[in-house]
Amino acid sequence: MKHILPAIFILISTFSFAQTKTFYDFTATNIDGEKVSMSQYKGKKVLVVNVASECGNTPQYAKLEELYDKYGSEKFAIIAFPANNFGEQEPGSNAQIKQFCTEHFHVTFPMMSKISVTGDDIDPLYAWLTTKSENGVLDAPVTWNFQKFMIDENGHVVGSVKPKTNPDTKEILDWIEENK
């Protein structure tokens, strides 16, 4: 018995420690090259989306902007992460991506620098978003451009929405409006 209690304590401590990392522990570089702490989003629901300019899902930028226009405030944010992981559909530089998004979709929500969202060079934020052992909630490997991750007001992953699903789906709208 005296050996079992320390083992249980170590297991509980290890599990608790593994679950303590939140969205707020990460930093990213925005599309203009400036460091951004995700802690600035404390208290907000955040929709994190990997995006690409030459994808069949690219028209979702318009729906994302509509969602941001309607709900974006002190309670909700959208953060886009351009990625070239799927079909090389985001080949441009950060400057080209920014120009495309501004000219074609009038994007005003935060855009980050291009990163990798899968594979050996996956960005640490996306490793956390997609791996249950890191986020404590779900395994949700990114399968294509425009996969959406819902982050609650406490910086925890609460869900993932498939790439082809539009941002104005009932699941996302209900989540945004919950406890408003």
Image (tube, rainbow, N blue to C red):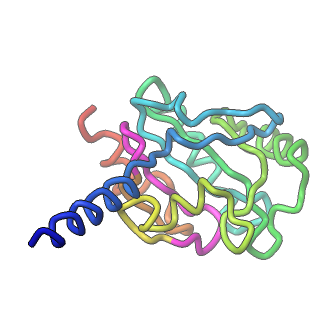
**Residue at (90, 51) in percent of width and height:** 93
Name the one closer to the observer, 43 or 10: 10
Q: Is residue 110 above or below residue 40?
A: below
Name the one closer to the observer, 169 or 131: 131
Q: Position of residue 34 (x, y in %)?
A: 78, 31
Dividing the picture into quadrants, the one containing residue 55 is bottom right
User: In the picture provided, is 56 more to the left or to the right than 125?
Assistant: right
User: Which residue extends farthest top?
Assistant: 74
User: In the picture provided, is 16 more to the left or to the right than 73?
Assistant: left
User: In the picture provided, is 141 more to the left or to the right than 121?
Assistant: left
Q: Main secondary structure of the magenta part?
A: loop
Q: Is residue 92 above or below residue 122?
A: above
User: Which residue extends farthest left?
Assistant: 1
Magenta extent: 141-156
Q: Position of residue 158 (x, y in %)?
A: 36, 54
Q: Is residue 28 magenta?
A: no
Q: Pick the quarter of the image with the N terminus.
A: bottom left
Q: Pick the quarter of the image with the C terminus.
A: top left
